[in-house]
Each structure stands twice: as C-alpha cells, then as structure tokens.
C-alpha cells in the first residue's frame, strides 16, 4: 500500500511515509471494524434478559480491550515491528498481572457468576458464607449484606460462590417448624387441641397447606409435639414468636402441664 518510489524516498525516523500512511489507513479500518463489532456485541448482550447491566458493561469493556490489543498488533505489523516479540511481551505482562491480582480476579469472576446466575437479588434475606442478612448490593468484587442488628458486611464474592447459599426470600411461602413439650401425664389429644386452638386463631397461618401437629418424641422428662404451619414469607418471624407466646398461654388456659427436666427417685425399703 502506497509503495511508490516518491513515498518511499520520504522517511520519518526509521519509517517511510508509505509505511506510515499504510499504518494510518489500517488504524482507520480497525477503528471502523471495532465500532461495528462493539455495536453488534452490545445488541447481542442486550438481548440476554437475565444479564445484569453491570455484567453487560464489564463484558463490553473486556471485548473492547481485546479488540484494541488485536488492532495494535496488526498496526505494529504494518509498521514493520516484529509482532512475535510484542505478543510474547503482552503474554508475559498478562501472566504477571494475573498472578499479582489473583485474588481480585477470583472475586471478579465470582461476581460475574453471581450476576449471571442470580442465586439471590438485592433485597433478599439470605445466609451466605456464614453470615445472615438482607442483600444490599451485588458488586463485581463484593456482596454487601445488612445483618439483623443493622451491620453492613462486605463479603468477597469468591467466598460467596464457594459457600452454600440459603435464600429465604426466593419462595412466596415458608414453613414454620416448632416443637413444644408437655408432661407425660397429659393426654395427646388434649395437648394437640390446645396447640390447634392457637393456630386456628392466627389469620396469618394458611389453611392450605394444612397445619400439622403430631407427637414427635418421648424424652426423659417430657413428650415433644412437632408443629408445622405455612405462612407468607413476610409473616415468618411474626408467626414464629407469636406461636411461642400463645401456645404457652393456651396450655395454661386448657390445663396442659408443661414439664421440665427432672428426676423421679423411688426409695425401696428392704
């Protein structure tokens, strides 16, 4: 390109004018191609419904950097610069950079995983990496949750992805599981009736699925009864604490004795 005696006779440093003009034309072509490809990738990524805007922006930036690296290698070849050495240099630099920021890259790709797979969203009540609270934000490096005692905790995304994730807000309904104890002397049906009295009086407890009350275990000093009721997710803790209080009151009203650990000693006379 532009390989004429007149242009080759003019030089700027170690480059001829023909070489520089060829590199300039190559640069303009690369610029046009990069803009076209970025618009194409942007359209493709916009069509992915579950992709977060942060992830979309990050991927477009990464694609743009990769395209410009390719363009620089092509332009360097047009200028007569040995591209093999340049590629090797970029590879070594990339390896050194990846080793130095290994932890950051781990959190970064973990953040991308969270944003694309959506195991939880902002506002969900979750348990991750041993911490429980409401998700405030999901970043590329950290996930921030607000605990029940109003403490903000930023958890590295690598720890979040590497742990079991409990999302308590994912479903509209939750089951409240509780256990109550009564004395051995109390008839089973009497105890169950006292518990059902409380369940039927609480409008937050759903009739479908039906509440479940049954004798669960025989302990040393008490008989345990299991209670399972379904509620709307937002009512979980309110019903949990209400059952604890109201069942005790119902036992008192209905004459159900609540026992506690004790030992009966029998003295046998010889």
Image (cartoon, helix red, strand yellow):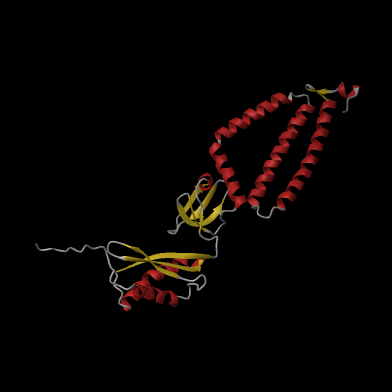
Q: Is residue 148 left or right of residue 265?
A: right
Residue at the limit of the structure toward the front, as seen here: 270
Residue at 73%, 26% (x, y): give it.
Answer: 83
Q: Nearer the viewer, residue 110 or 37?
A: 110
Residue at 57%, 40% (x, y): give it.
Answer: 105
Q: Nearer the viewer, residue 192 or 205?
A: 192
Q: 102 above or below 46?
A: above
Q: Is residue 137 left or right of residue 55?
A: left
Residue 11 place in picture, x, y as percent: 82, 22
Residue at 69%, 28% (x, y): give it.
Answer: 87
Q: Is residue 84 left or right of residue 255?
A: right
Residue 21 place in picture, x, y as percent: 84, 30
> Looking at the figure, which quarter contains the C terminus?
bottom left
Residue 227 place in picture, x, y as percent: 41, 67
Q: 200 above or below 140?
A: below
Q: Nearer the viewer, residue 245 or 39?
A: 245
> Looking at the figure, which quarter contains the N terminus?
top right
- Quadrant location of residue 91? top right
- Quadrant location of residue 25? top right
Residue 44 place in picture, x, y as percent: 74, 49
Q: How many marks?
A: 0
Q: Nearer the viewer, residue 15 or 153?
A: 153
Residue at the limit of the structure toward the left, as seen here: 270
């Amino acid at each position: 390109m532009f390989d004429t005696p007149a242009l080759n006779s003019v030089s700027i440093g170690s480059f001829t004018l023909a070489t520089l003009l060829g590199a300039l034309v190559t640069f303009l072509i690369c610029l046009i191609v990069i803009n076209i490809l970025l618009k194409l990738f942007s359209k493709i990524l916009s069509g992915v419904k579950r992709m977060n805007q942060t992830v979309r922006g990050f991927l477009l930036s990464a694609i743009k950097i990769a395209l410009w690296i390719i363009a620089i290698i092509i332009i360097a070849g047009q200028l007569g610069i040995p591209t093999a050495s340049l590629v090797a240099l970029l590879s070594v630099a990339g390896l050194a950079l990846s080793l130095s920021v290994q932890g950051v890259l781990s959190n970064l790709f973990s953040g991308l995983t969270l944003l694309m797979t959506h195991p939880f969203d902002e506002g969900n009540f979750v348990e991750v990496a041993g911490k429980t609270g409401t998700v405030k934000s999901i970043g590329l490096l950290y996930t921030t949750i607000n605990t029940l005692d109003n403490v903000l905790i930023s958890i590295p995304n690598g720890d979040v992805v590497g742990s079991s994730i409990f999302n308590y807000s994912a479903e509209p309904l939750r089951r409240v599981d509780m256990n109550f104890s009564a004395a051995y002397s109390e008839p089973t049906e009497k105890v169950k009736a006292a518990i059902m009295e409380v369940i039927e009086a609480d409008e937050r407890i759903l009739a479908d699925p039906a509440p479940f009350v049954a004798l669960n275990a025989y302990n040393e000093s008490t008989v345990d009864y299991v209670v399972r009721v379904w509620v709307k997710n937002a009512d979980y803790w309110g019903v949990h604490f209400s059952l604890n209080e109201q069942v005790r009151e119902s036992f008192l009203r209905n004459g159900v004795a609540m026992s506690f650990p004790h030992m009966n000693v029998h003295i046998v006379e010889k």
